[in-house]
Amino acid sequence: MKFCLPSKRINYDWASLIQSYKQYVSPSSTVLEIGASNLERTKELCGYCRKLIGLELLPERTPQDFDNVKYLTGDWQNVSEIIKPESIDIVISSHVIEHVPDDLKAINGLYEVLKPKGIALLNTPNRKRLVRAIVGIFSGERKFPWWEHLREYTEEDLLHLLGASLFTKYKIYPVVFGLHGGPIFFYAERVPEFLRRFANFWEIHLFKS
């Protein structure tokens, strides 16, 4: 277990996503980052690839192009109308899918813009993470939309979504177990299999045939 003060906290969900990204990216890769308003994260991603396209929904949150990074403003749901089909090696997106009205359309759009053998890496909160599961016993299920989240997913929800998509090969990984957010960070990076359903986040790997 790890205990971190808020001033020294590590967003392990992002750290895990980056580690996965490093396994697949190469200096010749063209990468699409969906939800690209965090400049520090984009700079981290672009150092490993030939070209990075950042897609951001809101014009006021879209940064200026730099180095090998080009930004586009647009809606993930329409990504196949914005990005050339079969032109992307890797898509990466952190905590965006839970904000998208038509998540199936968004997922299918990734399939269309990925090259054959391309991969998409996503993460999202688990609706039944430990803290929410405990709170739910006393206060009932959280109703969505909740703040900016239109929905959150259990693993079963994701399996249903992906099973309806164009992707036929995918993997879902549990990420972090414990308290990971707010004033207290006390968590295990590896999630015991028997506690998988209470993980804080899901990391999804989508493979195009």
Image (cartoon, helix red, strand yellow):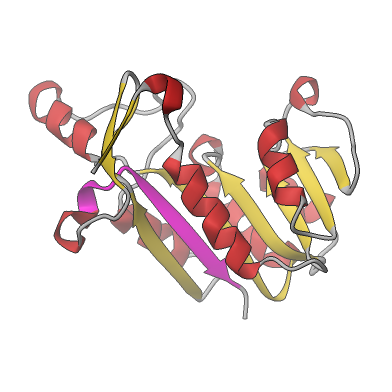
Residue 97 lies left or right of residue 43; in this view the side is left
- What residue lies at 53% left-to-right and 43% top-to-bottom? 97
- Whether residue 109 is visible: no
- What residue lies at 40% left-to-right and 62% top-to-bottom? 172
Front residue of this view, candidates 83 and 14:
14
Prevailing secondary structure of the magenta residues: strand
Q: Position of residue 16 (x, y in %)?
A: 47, 52
Residue 61 lies left or right of residue 108; in this view the side is right
Span shown in magenta: 197-207
Q: Specify the quadrant that holds the C terminus.
A: bottom right
Q: Is residue 204 magenta?
A: yes
Q: Quadrant of residue 9?
A: top left
Q: Quadrant of residue 110?
A: bottom right
Q: Position of residue 64 (x, y in %)?
A: 88, 30
Front residue of this view, candidates 86 and 42:
42
* Residue at the extreme left: 138
Q: Position of residue 69 (x, y in %)?
A: 85, 45
Q: Quadrant of residue 173?
A: bottom left
Residue 147 lies left or right of residue 119; in this view the side is left
Task: In the rendered view, tell whether residue 8 sits above or below residue 197.
Answer: above
Q: Position of residue 151 (x, y in %)?
A: 41, 36
